[in-house]
Amino acid sequence: MPARWWKSPPANKKMPMRITHAVVLVLCLCLVSACGEVWNDPYPDVEKQQGIIYEFFNSRPKHLDPVQSYVEDEAWFVYSTYEPLYDYHYLKRPYVLQPKTADAMPLISYRDAAGRELPADAAPASIAETIYEIHLKPGILYQPHPAFALDAAGRPLYLGLDDEAIGARTEISDFEHTGTRELVAADYAYQIKRLVRPGLESPGIAIFEQIVGLKDLSQRLEAALQAGRIDVNGWIDMRDFALEGVETPDAHTLRIHIRGKYPQFVYWLATSFVVPVPWEVERFYAQPGMAKREFTLDMWPVGTGPFMLTRNLPLRELRLERNPNFRLETYPCEGEAGDAESGLLDDCGKPLPLADGFRFSYEREAPPFWNKFLQGYYDFYSSARFAGFASFDTALQVQGDGLSLSRQMLEQGITLRTEIEPSVEYFFVNMLDPVLGNGADTPEKRERARKLRHAIAIAINIEEYLAIIKNGLGMAMQGPLPPGIAGYREGEAGINPYSYTWEKGQAVRRGIDAARALLAEAGYPNGRDAKTGEPLLIYFDGYDSFDRTRLELLVKQLKRIDIQLVPRLSEWNRFQEKHRKGNAQLSFWGWNADYPDPETFLFQYYSKNGKVKYQGENVTNYDRPEFDRLFEEFRGMDLDADRQQRIDAMVALLRHDAPVLAGWHNEAFLLSHAWFANAKPGKIIHSNRQYYSIDVARRAALRAQWNRPVLWPLGLTALLMVMLVVLALRHYRHHESRTAREETVA
């Protein structure tokens, strides 16, 4: 037996070197984790030093043609590329209308039925026509576009193209040459005529039919279509069709005649329905082969706005780039109280737009977007995007004094701005109903129904509703008008005294005991008919997509005063039919302001807009002669007149009669990173992107800090693997040594 059989075999001399290499590798990985570059940046390096703002979209913009566009997801692009005659001051509240491409507010004059001019204070009933004369700012240029490209002889460069000549072009930037021209009044006239162009369906036509001759133009166009003189799929040169109520006496003057007196018409001149559309552009897109490649106004708008759409991949990416032809416009130097303190006036006087452009990426669901927002790859988040904000609890906290940022958001330097939207969502009564409305056969019964409505109004606890359903985002309505709308009253003067009391400087909802007392006065003590003893059943007529949690809470709240709520849900078309025929009892509705005037909310209670009788927007079928008289007086008053007395009187009637039981105004919020400036919510304002700005260097630094690769786990894993290999080798050599010893012994 050899004397050294018990000793370990000689060690592998390469083993220490291999271990050293492994240790060095682990250290390098750890060092890289401390100073490495960002690996998950979804954007190209060339954009890192550019003032591009990153957003997302979650639904394809269907219409960018301003005649047809009417939804918020489209407005972001339409109002960035096109310019109406007027828009709203970005910062001031209540909203203030101001000139955009117009050089001043319109000159307004009146005519009687014989065409004679009337004084400014003429009675509305004597006014047959109102004339708006608008003068444009000279020198406004369109964005560069191939429709304006001319050859050396001044002829259109891209006219007469066929499918072969268009070739492989798929984006508007594929056309090599562009041109521009000055904005003229005729471009606005052309667009107004397009409101009735065959083949287009404008959601704004009901308003603009007030323009003298527009209905007649629609009939003439239809006749021409039927006679084969025009082709709905080709170019219809709207210059060939006269419109009596729109005049262009010179290149920079536009006159619009409307029937009667309607002071709120000026607000519609601030919408995308009245923006300039050049005839050259429509002719360009009408060429054969263009529509097949989606070269249309619905895909590629052309305007004078601060940005131009340069990429449109509907389910992938859209890009807005700075319009090089945009004129000098500057950031506002005035706002409302608190704007200066919050930094919203820091860019006072700077040329617009402040950003170089916008890049919109498609996101189907909220979680991927939210992760990218936290990583800094989206610059802000608006509550207007995803209706269901899945990460609410990680971002915002509801406290007694309102919304506040969570600790995580504060640590990242994220800013929160909120604003009550000019909107209402409410539970209402069909006033034709004999139990809840004014459909009873005696004044006594109608008075009992009114008290019943007030009892239900108290029981529907909107504060509880908002806390559970809306994460505290919203404000209980006290009347038909939301904050930010002229005529809205704040403080004690603004509460609904039938549902609230004023205590310690705030509105406090009346208690259940008050609701029960009113219920008894209405003839239903403890929720039972005082004469028959039968339980009171109230039917809720909603649509089938109405949130079940909302419904369950509503049932629970009415049960507190012993009222049994019976849901009658139906699909949307059936739901609408119920209201058209007056077969609903208690229901739910909502309204967003198109313009910041009380008229857009008060007209919903004008009897001549009744849903059943006139198929109008008065879904409650409210009919009160005194209200109608006040509304007609109010509607005929100039916007700068003192209308408050009549507004207060109408609001008081609505509170007393309670066609609307309870509701709320939605609260918008906007979360933005520390490098993002000038964010202010504003439901009515759609041209806000020209005011946004970013600190590019700060964004790059924070993105790198938040997204630095964490590689120490890889290093630790590698070290463990080395150790396992060493142990395995030792075990193997021990096993080999033992086998060798056994063989030697043998």
Image (cartoon, helix red, strand yellow):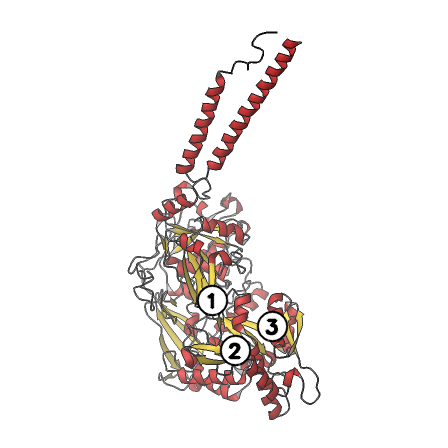
The residue tagged with tag 1: helix, strand or loop?
Answer: strand
Question: In the picture provided, is 347 more to the left or to the right than 388?
Answer: left
Q: Residues within 10 Å of mark 1 (few under 14, many from 20)?
A: some
Q: Mark 2 vs mark 3: give the one in front.
A: 3
The residue pinned by badge 2 equals 604
Looking at numbered disc 3 in the image, what kind of residue is underneath it?
Leu
Q: Secondary structure at mark 3?
A: helix
The residue at which mark 3 appears reads as: 554
x, y percentage for residue 181? 36, 56
* Left or right: 576 in relation to 29: right
Which badge, 3 or 1, comes first in the chain's sequence? 3
* Rendered location of residue 567, percent (x, y): 66, 72
The answer to whether residue 627 is above or below residue 242 is: below
Q: Earlier in the sequence, mark 2 or mark 1?
A: 2
Q: CA distance from mark 2 to mark 1?
A: 22 Å
Q: Is 484 left or right of 235, judged from the image as shown?
A: left
Camera-side residue: 20 or 558?
20
Mark 2 or 3, nearer chain start: 3
Badge number at residue 667? 1
Q: Nearer the viewer, residue 57 or 403?
A: 403
Q: Position of residue 106 (x, y in %)?
A: 36, 73
In the image, residue 322 sits, relative to residue 207, either above or below, namely: above
